[in-house]
Image: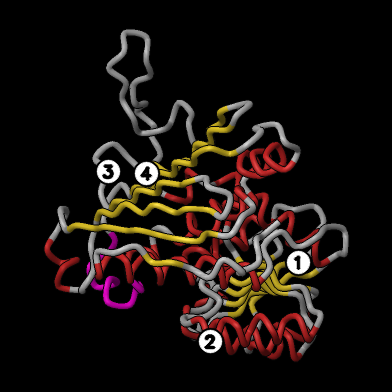
Amino acid sequence: MRIGVAGVGRIGTMHATNLAALAAVDEVLLFDPVPGRAAQVATLTGGGMVPVGTLDELLAASDGVLVATPTDTHPEVLRRCLAARVPALCEKPVAGDLDELHALAGAVEAAGVPVLVGFQRRFDPAVAELYRRIRAGALGTIYQVRAVGSDAVPPDFGYLPASGGIFRDLLIHDLDAVPWLVGEPVVEVYASGSVLVDQAFAAADDVDNVVAVLRFAGGAHAVLTGGRHDPLGYDHRIEVLGSRDALAVGLDPRTPLNSLEPDGPRVAADAYPGFPERFHRAYVSEMAVFVDVVAGRAENPSPVRDSVVSLRLADACEASRRSGAPVRLDETVEARA
């Protein structure tokens, strides 16, 4: 099997390396809009990676294509994948606004071409197991969900104006994963935020610490917290409390958290420094699942239509933060199963 990678910046190169390590992948083809970059990455990484000169060449030669080009090019590249009838995995966001995302979801469904969205938590083995146990009824009635999302260091301040804001950037993965896990529509959100890390966030009309409360149709609540600076490391975890069990993902010896209990855990010297280390297993699994979907051996766990939910929730959280009031959502929005 030949898998193409469109866009070989930091995350595209990581994906290409993980693809090359899979036994089912014979060759990884690389394309990048920056002249010479694909050849440079192929030379540095080696291991069956071959640069190609154009996106058309990539589409013609690939059984599936991973889209990791600049964010604003995702809709165009994805539509070209559909036109070529090449299955794709597209990094988030697939599109920057709800109207365009709705249109793309419709185009994908009409084409019948598999398209996965790169919400890597859905592919994380621990999160996938949590999803399986919830669906199997092992947790009983879901009472509460708590999600923590903290960066170790703030992003480059030059990135902030184009980030879409903290809910579309930092917390978008939680806004995807938590409703997916609960399996019910969110009917109301309330969010609040502050600038505590650096005034550069205020200058970009953003905040750097937030809390969001989601109320689900069945009455359960989720509390999501997000921050742009954790002095101990990169901390992203989810806890679910149900009537039969209480489970957590992202809680292990590398979690950057100190306990004051005598026998409690202390932060390790190798606490997670960033997302590549924290979600390494998720990214490896993501590429393996993508290859299986391309080969027809697996169902798509992250369809484009689901991305409408997380983007809609991010916009509702931002509206609530700005107004200081809860935002009601249409209860008829289909729950994700």
User: Does residue 164 belong to the magenta stretch?
Assistant: yes
- Decide which of tag 2 and tag 4 comes sooner along the chain: 2
Q: Amino acid at mark 4?
A: Tyr
Q: Which residue is mark 3?
A: 230
Give yes or no for contact between labels 4 and 3 (Cβ–Cβ under 8 Å): yes
- Decide which of tag 1 and tag 2 comes sooner along the chain: 1
Q: Secondary structure at mark 3?
A: loop
Q: Secondary structure at mark 4?
A: loop
Point out which mark residue 27 bears. Answer: 1
Q: Is residue 288 above or below residue 75?
A: above
Q: Nearer the viewer, mark 1 or mark 2?
A: 2
- Decide which of tag 1 and tag 4 comes sooner along the chain: 1
Rate crowding at label 4 as few (under 14), some (14 to 19) or many (20 or more) other CA atoms within 10 Å: many
Give yes or no for contact between labels 1 and 3 (Cβ–Cβ under 8 Å): no
Residue under the point 87% across and 58% down: 297
Q: Is residue 213 above or below residue 204?
A: above
Residue under the point 29% across and 54% down: 210
Q: CA distance from mark 2 to mark 4?
A: 33 Å
From this viewpoint, which residue is outermost toward the right?
296
Q: Amino acid at mark 2?
A: Asp
Magenta extent: 155-165
Q: Amino acid at mark 1?
A: Glu
Q: Which residue is mark 4?
A: 234
- Please tell me in which quadrant of the rendered image residue 18 appears: bottom right
Q: CA distance from mark 1 to mark 3?
A: 39 Å
Q: Nearer the viewer, mark 2 or mark 3?
A: 2
User: Does residue 60 belong to the magenta stretch?
Assistant: no
Q: CA distance from mark 1 to mark 2?
A: 36 Å
Residue 191, position as x, y percentages in the image: 32, 58
Give yes or no for contact between labels 2 and 3 (Cβ–Cβ under 8 Å): no
